[in-house]
Amino acid sequence: PVIYLIGVKLFNRRIGLMAALFFSFSFVDVYISQRARGQAFSSLFLLLAFYYICKIVENHRLLNYVLVGIFSGMAISIRVNMSPIIVTFILVHLFCTGKNRNLWRKIIRPRFLLALLFVPIFFALSNPAINEQIKFVRDIWINFTTSTAVYIGSQPAQCAYLFYLKQGFID
C-alpha cells in the first residue's frame, strides 16, 4: 500500500497500481518478507519516510516533518545503509521551503530541526543493541551500588569494590 501511495502522490493512480503490482511480484522483496528478516521492516519504514518527504513538497505541516524523522530513525536503526534518506530529506527541505529565504533561515526552521532530532531519538529507542547496552550499564550500576546478601557476622557485607577501597588490596 505504501508503494501505491507514493505512486499516486508522484504521478497518478494508474502508476501507483503498476508500482504496487511490480513490487508485490519482486522476487527479492517476496523472499525477504517470507523469511521475516529486518530488511522488510526497514524497507517499510524507508518507504513511509519517503512518502512523508513527498508530502513535504506539497505542504510544510509539522506532522509531516515529525513522521519523516520517526520513520527515518526506525529504518536506520534496522539497517544503517538506509541513512541516505536523511540526505534526501535535507535536500527536499532546502529546495522546497521558499525561494526567497536565505540558507540559514531554511536550516534553523524549528520543524526541520525537530525532524532531525527525532531521527537519533527513534534510532536509539528502536535499536535493540542500544537497549541492551543501556540495560548492561544499568545492571552493572545496580551491582556496584547495592550490598550483597551474604552476611559476615551480624552485618550485611559491603560491595566488593567498596571493601577493597576501604581496606586496600592486602594479600
Image: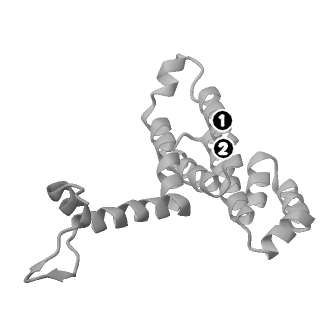
- How busy is the neighbourhood of tag 2: few (under 14 within 10 Å), some, or many (20 plus)? some
Question: In the orientation shown, which residue stands out farthest toward the left?
Answer: 154
Location of residue 84 in the rendering, given as x and y in whole percent from the top left corner: 69, 40
Q: Decide if residue 48 is on the left or right side of residue 132.
A: right
Question: Would residue 127 be seen by someone viewing this image from the given angle?
Answer: no
> Which label is found at residue 121?
none
Of the pair 35 and 131, the residue shown nearer to us: 131
Q: Secondary structure at mark 1?
A: helix
Question: Circle 2 is placed at which residue position?
Answer: 83
* Above/below status of 70 relative to 93: below
Residue at the spot x=22%, y=67% of the render? 159
Tag 2 and tag 1, C-beta contact below 8 Å: yes
Of the pair 147 and 161, the residue shown nearer to us: 161
Residue at the spot x=48%, y=45% of the render? 62
The span from disc 2 to disc 1 (Cα, nearest Å) is 8 Å
Q: Split into 4 quadrants, where in the image is the N terminus?
A: bottom right
Residue at the spot x=68%, y=51% of the render? 51
Q: Secondary structure at mark 2?
A: loop
- How busy is the neighbourhood of tag 1: few (under 14 within 10 Å), some, or many (20 plus)? few
Location of residue 98 in the rendering, given as x and y in whole percent from the top left corner: 57, 25
Question: Circle 1 is placed at which residue position?
Answer: 87
Q: Of the residues shown, which amino acid type is indicated by label 1?
A: Val
Q: Decide if residue 162 is on the left or right side of residue 60.
A: left
Location of residue 163 in the rendering, given as x and y in whole percent from the top left corner: 19, 63
Q: Split into 4 quadrants, where in the image is the C terminus?
A: bottom left
Of the pair 118 and 135, the residue shown nearer to us: 135
Q: Of the residues shown, which amino acid type is indicated by label 2?
A: Ser
